[in-house]
Image (spheres, rainbow, N blue to C red):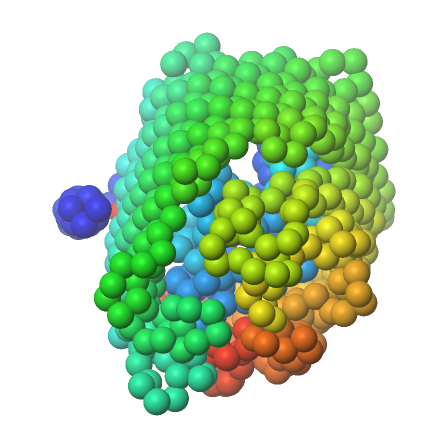
């Protein structure tokens, strides 16, 4: 991968020395009517936002760049109803929770690739190793979405690399700063009527800081390095036929303290390797579409203590999926599909197959309705039926303003992972976990909300949600006996308020507030889930669009955590963090930028005994052609 990154960087430098071209990407251009923005994540096929009855957040490349954070989770966490807990700095164990649900119930797709690690503790995404460089668009679907995505989907994050590139374009981006941090990212892409491609590579390294508060004797810095190569290519074969291939390669190395549960052991590190490939073919015309894809994901995690190789995991995820649609039927469109998935983890194997159909109404310009059902057949846990219904209604008000009402109800399920089952039946487990026969989790949730649009200048959203997980599986943090199950219902109930306002062409304001009351079956608050989350952003563009200033302020309040050996939960400190980014365009192809993270130098913990980064500053340069 070092060779790949070097070649890509050299190619970008050589091309940057040539005369600038007129090629540019069209994907991040603003939509004149926000209700007509095309969203893929809600139904797995492109649908205008006005027809969607579920709650979706969207970030484009320009907005991702405005946040400026290297780690993708630090960008996404500033969207509504998203909480993140991380055991230290970049690359350490990270959980991203949508509406309070566990991070492993969140499904993450990158150009169609399912970024789930079957060999992990749970079959979930390793978001700690996903960097923000090279991403063109992020779509986040909130709430149980077991319909077209299948098991484990308590929320969906759909990530896309740059597409619709005319001609040839590329960039070279490097920055450095606090904690001995250095990042070099390069990308190159191009396209015409016959073929298109995009390749991005990132080399990130930081010395880090002391992540454990209990590490007070042999204080050491805990660093992280990441090399990622992501490539996509597509070929238009004529008459609506297309062939696509995506490949992703990640190497991450994380240093940390505490190789063993409840202890502070120094000189520990984890090496994480991921190789994933997806091949797909599709046919589309105005009346129908068909797409068939095969993907394979291999992951390898090796843990070291004091330089000696210890616990390791090896996983493989093979997936075949088909999705089709029939359009322009009498009053509705039809989406249907099937997927066959094989999980292999540390010598264990499991298959799951699913079939689904989704009906989208198309009989009105103002009223939209969807209804769908899915059937899953799991090797170990039998058959499960999931369904979702949603509706959206548009009211055209005076002066072209629009009021949108929406509502949805969805269900899903999650089978215990191969690792959870193996741990409880293995050498390290003891009562009570070794006596527990884990069973599947079932989830359901509904939401009702309204959105108000004044052209492209103002968007307001208010959503009430209520969702629950039955028999939630969790790790025994009190005695580390293994995996236990909360027999009964765990709930998340609250509301989200979101506002985006363009004061004028120079000033933009945004903000969101989430109140989420979470409870376990025993009435206790669910750990590491803040009851209150708030984000405020201010952006300024001036000097003929050459200067960009952005300030993002986030607040987290009323979270609790569990501590080793204690049956009592401990309150985590409330905290407020301000990040500031600034960029200035020197020439048509050269831009300089700077970033300050945690400007107030807030001292806080998202997980008990684990420190978060202090104030840090970074400076960089970005060149493009």
Between residue 113 and residue 426, name the one nearer to us: 426
Residue 50: x and y, percent?
Answer: 72, 39
Residue 278 showing in the rendered view:
yes
Name the residue: 49% across, 51% down.
Answer: 426
Of 625 and 429, which appears nearest the observer?
Answer: 429
Residue 597 coordinates in the image, percent (x, y): 44, 75
Above or below — where is 566 with respect to 29? below
Residue at x-position 37% and y-position 80%: 210
Q: Percent from the top left, x then y, of residue 325? A: 63, 19
User: Which residue is the extreme one toward the top?
Assistant: 239
Above or below for 531 versus 42 = below
Q: 232 above or below 474?
A: above
Residue 620, compared with residue 596, is above or below; it is above
Question: For residue 475, which quarter of the picture?
Answer: bottom right
- Relative depth, front residue between 520 and 624: 520
Name which residue lies at 77% across and 64% down: 519
Q: Between 28 and 531, which is closer to the camera in this rendering?
A: 531
Residue at figure coordinates x 60%, y 19% from the top left: 324
Count of residue discs: 0
Within the image, what quadrant is residue 318 found in?
top left
Place of residue 90 in the rendered image (x, y in percent of width and height, measured from the top left): 40, 66
Q: Is residue 573 left or right of residue 367?
A: left
User: Is residue 134 something that shows in the picture?
Assistant: no
């Amino acid at each position: 991968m070092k060779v790949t990154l070097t070649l890509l960087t050299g190619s970008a430098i050589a091309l940057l020395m040539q005369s600038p071209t007129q090629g540019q990407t069209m994907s991040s251009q603003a939509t004149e009517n926000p209700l007509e923005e095309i969203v893929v994540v809600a139904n797995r096929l492109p649908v205008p936002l006005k027809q969607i009855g579920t709650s979706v957040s969207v970030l484009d490349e320009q907005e991702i760049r405005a946040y400026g954070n290297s780690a993708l989770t630090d960008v996404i966490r500033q969207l509504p109803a998203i909480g993140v807990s991380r055991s230290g700095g970049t690359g350490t164990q990270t959980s991203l929770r949508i509406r309070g649900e566990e991070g492993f119930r969140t499904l993450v797709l990158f150009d169609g690739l399912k970024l789930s690690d079957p060999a992990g503790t749970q079959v979930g995404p390793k978001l700690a190793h996903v960097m923000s460089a090279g991403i063109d668009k992020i779509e986040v679907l909130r709430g149980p979405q077991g319909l077209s995505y299948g098991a484990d989907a308590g929320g969906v994050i759909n990530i896309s690399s740059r597409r619709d590139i005319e001609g040839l374009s590329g960039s070279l981006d490097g920055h450095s700063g606090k904690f001995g941090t250095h990042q070099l990212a390069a990308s190159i892409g191009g396209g015409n009527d016959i073929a298109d491609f995009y390749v991005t590579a990132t080399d990130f390294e930081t010395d880090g800081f002391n992540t454990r508060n209990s590490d007070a004797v042999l204080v050491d810095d805990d660093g992280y390095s990441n090399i990622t190569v992501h490539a996509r290519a597509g070929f238009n074969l004529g008459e609506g036929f297309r062939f696509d291939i995506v490949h992703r390669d990640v190497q991450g190395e994380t240093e940390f303290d505490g190789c063993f549960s409840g202890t502070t052991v120094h000189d520990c590190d984890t090496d994480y390797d991921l190789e994933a490939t997806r091949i797909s073919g599709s046919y589309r015309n105005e009346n129908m579409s068909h797409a068939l894809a095969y993907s394979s994901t291999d992951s390898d995690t090796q843990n070291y203590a004091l330089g000696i190789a210890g616990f390791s995991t090896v996983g493989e995820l093979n997936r075949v999926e088909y999705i089709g649609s029939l359009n322009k039927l009498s009053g509705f469109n039809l989406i249907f599909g099937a997927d066959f998935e094989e999980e292999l983890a540390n010598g264990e194997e499991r298959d799951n197959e699913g079939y689904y159909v989704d009906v989208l109404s198309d009989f009105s310009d103002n009223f939209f309705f969807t209804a769908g059902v899915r059937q899953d057949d799991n090797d170990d846990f039998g058959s499960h039926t999931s369904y979702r219904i949603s509706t959206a209604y548009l009211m055209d008000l005076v002066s072209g303003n629009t009021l949108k009402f929406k509502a949805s109800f969805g269900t899903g399920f999650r089978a215990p992972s191969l690792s959870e089952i193996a741990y409880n039946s293995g050498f390290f487990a003891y009562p009570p976990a070794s006596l527990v026969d884990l069973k599947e989790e079932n989830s359901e949730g509904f939401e009702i909300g309204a959105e108000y649009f004044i052209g492209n200048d103002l968007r307001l959203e208010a959503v009430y949600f209520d969702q629950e997980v039955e028999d939630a599986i969790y790790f025994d943090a009190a005695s580390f006996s293994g995996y236990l199950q909360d027999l009964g219902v765990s709930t998340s109930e609250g509301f989200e308020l979101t506002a985006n306002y363009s004061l004028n062409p120079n000033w933009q304001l945004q903000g969101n507030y989430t109140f989420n009351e979470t409870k376990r079956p025993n009435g206790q608050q669910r750990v590491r889930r803040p009851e209150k989350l708030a984000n405020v952003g201010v952006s300024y563009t001036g000097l003929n669009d050459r200067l960009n200033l952005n300030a993002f302020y986030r607040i987290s309040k009323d979270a609790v955590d569990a501590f080793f050996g204690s049956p009592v939960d401990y309150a985590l400190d409330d905290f407020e963090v301000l990040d500031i980014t600034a960029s200035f365009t020197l020439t048509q192809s050269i831009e300089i930028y700077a970033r300050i993270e945690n400007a107030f130098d807030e001292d806080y913990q998202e997980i008990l005994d684990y420190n978060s980064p202090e104030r840090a500053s970074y400076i960089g340069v970005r060149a493009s052609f």
